[in-house]
Every structure is written in structure tokens, then in C-alpha cells.
Image: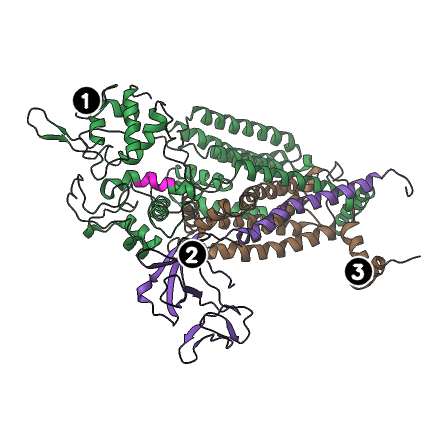
Chain colours: A purple, B green, C brown
Amino acid sequence: MSGSNHISRRDFIKVTTGAIGGFIAGVLGIPSIAYMISPALREDKAGKPMPIGKLEDIPIGTPHPFSFTITKVNGWERTAASYGGFILRKSEDPNDILVLSSRCTHLSCRVNWNETAGAFLCPCHDAKFSKEGEVLDGPPPEPLGHFTHEVDAEGYITIIPVEQKAG
Amino acid sequence: MTDETKKKINAKYERELLHGERFWPDSLFKDAIVALGIFIFLVLLATFVGVHDSPKADPSDTSYVPRPEWYFLFLFKFLALYGQIPVFGKIEWVATVLIPGIAIGLLTLLPFIDKSPQRYYAKRAMPIAIMTIMVLGMVLLTMTADVPTVAADGSGLLGNLQTVAGLIVPSLAYIAFVGMAYTLKENAVRAIAWTTALAAALMIGFTAATLALYQPAAVAVIEIPTTLADQIVAGQDLYSVHCVECHGDDGKVEEITGVEGLEGKKISIISSKDVLYTVNDASMAEIIAYGRPDSGMNPFGKAYNPEGLTRSEIDYVVTFMRYTWDDRFEAPYIAPLYPPLAEGEVPSYSVHIEPIVKRYCISCHRPGKDNNNYLMTSYEELLTTGDNASHNLISNDPTSYLLQVIQQIPITDPASGEELIGVMPPNKALKPEIVEVFVRWVQAGMPK
Amino acid sequence: MRSTLWQKLFSWLDERLGLNDAYKNLLDRPEPKGNWWNTLGSASLFLFILQAVTGIFLTVYYTPSPDHAYDSIQYIMTEVQFGWLVRGIHHWSASLMVIVVFIHMLRVFFTASYKYPRELTWLIGIGLLLLTVGMGFTGYLLPWHQMAYWATTVGTQIAGSVPFAGEFILKSLRGGPDLSALTLQRFFAAHIWILPALLVALIGVHLYLIIRHGESHFPDKED
């Protein structure tokens, strides 16, 4: 048998049996991977513009906290989640505004504005950010994120509720 | 069993092994082929047949007819037949517990009941006969599971046929087997085989007669909306029938008009942020199901009204409201109500008018509502019913009452000057393009 | 003889795992001449493995609560990639498994393979048949649709007709007098933990007994 170009019946059925096993495992296995990672492949929706306040109510020079709630459809559940941030009016100019996220760029704890320190402090790992979101101290790798915003004719500020990277 | 017999059995097995095969790869090869066949069969079933779900469980819907999974149907049918037996039929646990219990017990203890070392078929006529009749009975009972034991007209024919096929013939056969085994001893094989064949033929015959005589009622297939878009559309259709009457097609009605018993009632705008942001899906479903009687909201759930909405249906209505009015939700693409009309295209009832009527009119224009007896649930009704049937729709006549009222012109009685029919729909005018569809339809002579 | 890295690895593993012995005892066994009816047992095992695999995948999304069970399955069917395939296979192979296991039992019955020395194999086989039906019964409720709900209401009521202990059995099955969240949860637990654990244990013994006694041969006039 060895040396012959013909494979024996025995070898043939061995190979076929193995191939059938492999085929079933493959037809079941590959879709299963797609099945498992399916939610991860979903694109996040940009979300609708969210009103977060009126220009005239916001003091100039200090970060002013705001929050908004968006509803997300996760699988079979519709959940409302609150997010927050700070609006900083740098000057009287209605367009000179920075809308910062309160999510620390280190590990996503929520930063707070501390008036005495004159900085955003993160309660988790003592990170410190400047008024404009620059890293002053601590572990964060990059400045605070911000939201794209718009001010309409009546002075209402709306944001697109998707955090943008600084820069 | 003596040691000698055991030795004989083992020796015979050793001889069989000598001209046998190898587990790997000979047997496993066959196993693999069968596994492959099964696997392909299952994938085909999953792909082309799919899974047919019924609507969401609704404990308040007592109208639902329970059916067990198919492999319990024979037991289900057996219980129904057994229940027809006079006197004994009332002792339920005999059929539910005792008989299945004995059957399973006998099956389990089989090797200890049938202790003879003989394995060849002809030497085991009795067990084979008993099992054959048992399995045949199970198959036949499963096949007749849908046939009622007691017909609606009270005739017991079908029930009797089934009882003969499913209970009497097998019981008689079993008695005969035991009798033959005792009286004929060694010669029983042939007799048992013939009895089995006869009993089987009778059982199959009576079952065939049952199935031939039985006319199955048409079963309404319930289509279940599965995608979000389908659910929204289903919800909108239900909303159109049940809710538009009071709340209007956009949910903006604040004061009910034209509804008997609730005339002038002040209600909340259900499409407002106040309602949508503060009432979650579950609460909204409860409000629809149980109503808010003090605020004028009637209950729509099955618990109060056998013709009301099921759990699933209420969920669809809530989904519709969320995705249509709640600005925090983005609705998926939904096909338009009717295909838009091209320049000069003639609309037809089935393609254009029916969906429009279903959404905007049918909530009031259906039986049991205050609507001048004008029903709009079918083409014929649309043309022929109502107190003003002769004026409602006249071919190519722009003064048809229907056309006037949807164009915000109330119909007045020429004699008394009294208003006969108010504008329709009473709470909000139809969009101009929808009115246009009606106008063109009447112009063309109301084609079906 | 040159020994490659693979051969070295194999012999290292063989010394510790006994791969060659395992091959000889488990795979390279002699068997009597069989035919296609002999594949029913392995087909049952194949279906069980298929059910286990697809079942495990289903639990990734399925939620055993009356509020979400139905919606989570709708989600699997419409939103999750290949969810329809995984559930479709699980659904259909449940029915098929009942058929195959039952026919396997009939094959053993008609060839009288349950006799000496395989009495225990039969006993365990009946246990496996009942557990399979139990899996079907508990699994049927999980989608929490109308058919499931009402079929289980009637099915558990049948258990409730046992004289004297009926009421107690009914409540133990349902986790209370009515079908509720508790029923769904305990059927789920039975379906994914209790019954499969018993099945695996019994399948193990069943297979051990088959290897120990070998597959039975088809009887001829001598038997």
C-alpha cells in the first residue's frame, strides 16, 4: 500500500469522516462567531442634537455644569442614560464656547470643577485638567473630550451627543 | 440465567466479532454520514421553514386553545378519548398518571421482565407484537389529534371511530396476545403475527375513516411582525382601529368629539413630551390594557374585553407611539401607506383606498359605532352601506358626500338647513395628497 | 529513526496521557457487522452535542423573564447575525432528537439488544429518553409565547392530577399555584443546568457500557 498512488478504501473513509466533522464544525462555528460579536459590529448612531441650555444663563469665565439624557435601544431594552459636561464661555462672543465632556480620559470617571483649585479634578486617580480641558497633572493621556455645538438665533445651545476627541 | 447460557452468549458474540468491522473508521464513517445528513436537514429547515412563533404569552387571554408540543399530542388525544369512557373516564389520574406510569415502568424494567435469552425475532412474537401495536397507536393518535372527540353538532361518530381505533382495538389485541401465549404456547407465533396484522389494519382503517370524515376548520394563520418596522406598522394599524376615534391619528386631541359617551371629555395629548418622556413602555402598556376610567380612558386589554388587544398587540401600539412621536427615538425606514400616485395614474381600492380607509376611517366606520350606519371595512360596504348610501359615492361626481366632507365641507339638509354630516375625520383634516387620491378615485368611477 | 519535533511532542504527551492506549481501547475496537440502524445512537449523541452548542449560544442573548423572554428571542431572530440559524437549528433539532432517541429505543427493542449483558445500558437508555422528553417539555416554555404558556399550563396541570400529592407536585413544578416568573426561571434552570447535567452523566455511563460490552450484533436464528 505504501508507495502506491492510490489511497486505500480505509484511508479514504478516514479522510472523509474527518472532512465531514470539519465541515459541520465550520458551518456551525463560523456563523457562531458572527453571532457572538454581532452587537459589536453595530454602528453607533450619531444621535439627535440635544438642547443643553440658554446662552444668557451661563456665566462667562467659569465652567458651568449641564446634563442631558439620551435614550438608547440596546437589544430588546430601551434605556435612558444621563450624561454630563461643562459649558465654558470664554468671552461675550456667543461663538466663543467650549462644551467639555466630564468623562476623564484616563478611565472614564467623572471629573468635577473645583473652584479653589481652579481646575477639573478627577476623584479616582487624582487627575487634574485645566479650565479648557488640558491635562495639568496625573495619569490622563489626553485632554478632556468635547461636544460639537451650535448656538441658534434665540441663544439656545444644542450639542451633538457624541464625544469628540480634543484637538 | 445460568452461567452456561451466559458463556454461550459471550462465545457467540466473540464469533460475530471475527467477521465484523472496526469502530474506527468503519462505524464512525457511517455515523459521520448520518450526522452530516441530519445537519444539512436541520440547516435547511432553519433556513427555509424557520420557527413559527405565536404571539407573546398573555395570561389574560383565555380564548387561546392550548396545544402541546407535537410529541405529546398522542398523550393529549389519549386523555380526550379516555375522558369519553363512562364512569371510569371521570377518574382522571388513571389516564394521566397510572397508565403512562405503568407503560414507562414496564419499558424500564423490560430486561428484568423479559428474561429469556432468546433474541431472534420469531422467538419473541409477543413483545414485538405488543410494541408494534403500542407504537402504531401512538402514531395514529398523533395523526388524529386535531379531530374533535365530540363534534360541535353533538354527533359522536368521529369520537366513536377514534375510540375504536385508539382504545378498543389495541385493548382487544393485547387481551388476545396474552390469551394466545397461554393457550397456544409454542405455536402462538403465527397466531400472534396474524392478530397483530389484523389489529393494525383495523386501527389504520378506522383512523383513515376518521380523517376522511373530518373536515378541518380553516385555521387562521397569525402573521407575527418580527422586524421593528413591521411592529411599528402593526401598531399603527391597531392604533388606527382602536385609538384614532378618541385620540386622533396624531394623538393630539385634547377634547373628544363625536364619540358616544365620551363627548366633550378633556384628555391628555398622548403624543406630547409630557406623556412620552414620563411614562415608560411598561406603564403605557398597562394604561392601554387596564384603562384610566376616571380620565375617560377605556381598558383595551383582553382581561376586560374578549375582543380587545393581546399583550403583543399592546406592545406594538406602544412601539408605534414611541417611534412616531418620541423625538428621542429614530424610526427605521417604513414603507409608505400607499404607493405614491404618478401623474394621471388612477388609484384603485385595493392598492390605495383600502390602506387609507384602514388608517383614518375604520376606527369609527365599523360595526357597533356611531357612524350613520356607514361601514367602511370592505369595498362593497364602502359603496353600499350607510344612511346616505345613494349620495356617499357617485361615480365621477365631485358632490359625492364623501368627497365633500373630507374636503371640510359639511353636508346640510337642503330642506331644514340642519347639518347632516359633519366634516371628516371629525378631529383633523386629511392631508391634501390623500384627499387627492379620493378625488381621482371617484373621478375614475371607484375602481376596485 | 529521525524523530521530528511533532513526534517528540506526541511521545511526551503519550507517556502522560496514554494516547495510544486510548486509541486502541476507544477507537480501534472490533465490532460485529453493523448496518445503518446502528447509527441511531451516535445520531442521538450528535444531536445532543448540537443542542448543547446552539443552546449555549442562545443563552448569550436569551433572558428568562416574562418581561423580556419573548423580546429577547425576537431580537435573536431579527437583529443578531445568524440568530435565526442558531435558534432554527436548536428548535428543529429538539424535535428531531425526540424522534431519533425514540427510534433508537425501538431498534434496541426489536433486536432484543437489551438482554444480557446489556440490561443496564437499556435502563440508562430509558433514563436518557425520559430526560430528552423532559428537555423538550422545559424548553418549550422558554420562548414565553401563547402556545408555550398555555401548553405548559395544561402540561403541569396533568402532573397535578396525581392523587393526594398532585397539588404539591403542581406547585413544585410551577414554583407556585400559577404559571409565573418563577415557573419560567425554574424551567430555565432545569433546561440549561439540571437536566443537561443528568444527561451528560448518564450519556457517560451509557457510552462506557457500550465500550465495555461492545455493540450488540443483529440476532440470527441461533440467538
- Magenta: predominant secondary structure element? helix
- The magenta segment: B233-239
Q: Which residue bears the numbered disc 1?
A: B391
Labels 3 and 2 share a subunit: no
Left or right side of C179 for C191: right
Tell me which residue sits at (65%, 38%) in the image.
B37
Q: Residues within 10 Å of mark 3 (few under 14, many from 20)?
A: few
Residue B235: within the magenta? yes
For mark 2, name the chain. Answer: A
Foreground tag (3 vs 1): 1
Mark 2 neighbour density, 10 Å: few (under 14) some (14–19) many (20 or more) = some
Tag 3 near tag 1, CB within 8 Å: no
Q: Do discs 2 and 1 belong to a common subunit?
A: no
Identify the residue position indicated by label 2 in the image: A160
Image check: C178 left or right of C14?
left
Q: Are marks 3 and 2 in contact (CB under 8 Å)?
A: no
Residue type at tag 2: Ile
Q: Amino acid at mark 3?
A: Gly
Q: Which residue lies most toward the bottom here?
A: A116
Q: Residue at x 42, y 73 (%)?
A: A112
Q: Secondary structure at mark 1?
A: helix
Q: Nearer the viewer, mark 2 or mark 1?
A: 2
Badge 1 amino acid: His
- Position of residue C180 measured from the top left corner of the image (x, y, whole percent): 39, 54
Along the viewing direction, whichever of C53 and B259 lies nearer the viewer: B259
Instruction: Give me the C-alpha separation between circle 3 and circle 2.
Output: 64 Å
The kind of secondary structure element at disc 3 is loop
Label 3 resides on the chain identified as C
Q: CA distance from mark 3 to mark 1?
A: 95 Å
Residue at which label 3 appears? C18
Residue C54 or residue C167, whichever sits in front: C54
